[in-house]
Image (tube, helix red, strand yellow):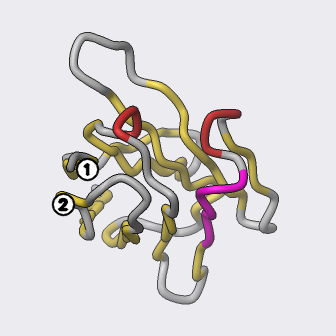
Amino acid sequence: QVQLVESGGGLVQPGGSLRLSCAASGSISSISYMGWNRQAPGKQRELVAGVTRGGSTNYVDSVKGRFTISRDNAKNTMYLQMSNLKPEDTAVYYCNVIVEGYRHWGQGTQVTVSS
């Protein structure tokens, strides 16, 4: 069993910032990949950003230059620093990790960008 606990979501005004955290615990021998996906109402879930164990990152084009993903391997924790938030960033953000070839999902945290 792998448990993922997300935190840091909330309501923020356009142009504001939030930092999401995802702490993994349980049957973890090695997390090869950690990532954030999001799903807005009426839309498909999409990749936002991901980071490998070695530190390689990737981002969806719409967040490049505004979001930064990072991870602390010693703590099995991942972060998503989100800046210059826009209303279109409003969504439920899901943490996900790959452990021994299997992907596990968190319960999601709501991010709402609105004035």
Residue picked out by circle 1: 111
Q: Which of the 4 quarters of the picture holds residue 13?
A: bottom left
Instruction: Categorize mark 2 by other alpha carbons within 10 Å: few (<14), some (14-19), many (20+).
Output: some
In the figure, is residue 35 to the left or right of 91? right
Residue 21 rendering spot, x and y as whole percentages: 37, 70
The rendered magenta stretch, by its main secondary structure, is classed as strand
* Quarter of the figure with the N terminus: bottom left
Q: Nearer the viewer, residue 2 or 5?
A: 5
Residue picked out by circle 2: 10
Kind of residue sitting beneath label 1: Val
In magenta stretch: residue 68: yes
| Element on which disc 2 rests | strand
| Element on which disc 1 rests | strand
Q: Is residue 5 above or below residue 43?
A: below
In magenta, the rendered stretch is 65-70
Check if mark 2's residue and mark 1's residue have beta carbons within 8 Å.
yes
In the figure, is residue 66 to the left or right of 23? right
In magenta stretch: residue 97: no
Q: Nearer the viewer, residue 91 or 109?
A: 91
Q: Residue at x 51, y 68 (%)?
A: 81
Q: Nearer the viewer, residue 86 or 45?
A: 86
Sooner in the amino-acid sequence: mark 2 or mark 1: 2
Give the Cα distance between marks 2 and 1. Answer: 5 Å
Residue 7 rendering spot, x and y as whole percentages: 24, 68
Q: Residue at x 51, y 63 (%)?
A: 83
Residue 28 rendering spot, x and y as whole percentages: 45, 67
Q: Is residue 106 above or below residue 74?
A: above
Kind of residue sitting beneath label 2: Gly
Q: Residue at x 39, y 51 (%)?
A: 95
Instruction: Categorize mark 1 by other alpha carbons within 10 Å: few (<14), some (14-19), many (20+).
Output: many
Q: Residue at x 43, y 58 (%)?
A: 15
